[in-house]
Image (cartoon, helix red, strand yellow):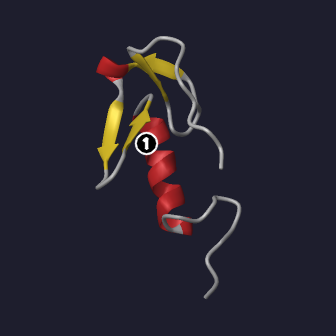
Amino acid sequence: MREPEIPSDPDRVACKVCFKEIPLSEAVNEEATDYVLHFCGLDCYAKWKTQEKDYGSGNSPGKKLSS
């Protein structure tokens, strides 16, 4: 299992989509029951949301759900 990336500055987080480090205070959050995802902006959030709809949670973006 891949280790989570630790930002070089604790007040910064990595965007879930493009991995760009952004200030925690400026991150767009999508809260879930057990974790929080950070996005550098609405474009990356929209891209992630579209991927989630297309592939479902728990599946990698490269693998479509079987019908």
Residue at 65% from the left image edge and 44% from the top image edge: 2
- Name, please, the residue furthest toward the bottom: 67
Residue 61 quadrant: bottom right
Compared across the picture, whether 55 is left or right of 2 comes to left
Residue 4 on image: x %, y %? 56, 36
Nearest the eye: 32 or 53: 32
Give the vertical position of 8 relative to 36 (above or below): above
Indicate left or right for 42 with 31 as reference.
Answer: right
* Mark 1 closeness class: few <14, some 14–19, many ≥20 residues within 10 Å: many
Q: Which residue is mark 1?
A: 45
Residues 7 and 66: in front is 7
- Residue 55 at x, y percent in the picture: 56, 67
Q: Is residue 3 left or right of residue 14?
A: right
Q: Residue furthest top?
A: 9
Asked if residue 32 lies left or right of residue 55, the reply is left
- Name the residue located 51 percent from the left edge and 38 percent from the top edge: 16
Q: Quadrant of residue 17?
A: top right
**Above/below status of 40 relative to 3:** above
Residue drawn at 56 percent across, 24 percent down: 20
The x and y percentages for residue 42 are 40, 36
Residue kind at label 1, given as amino acid type: Tyr
Look at 44% across and 46% down and name the residue there: 46
The residue nearer to you, when weighing 51 against 24, is 24
Number of marks drawn:
1
Q: Position of residue 54 (x, y in %)?
A: 54, 67
User: Tag 1, which secondary structure?
Assistant: helix
In which quadrant is the C terminus drawn? bottom right
Q: Residue furthest right?
A: 62
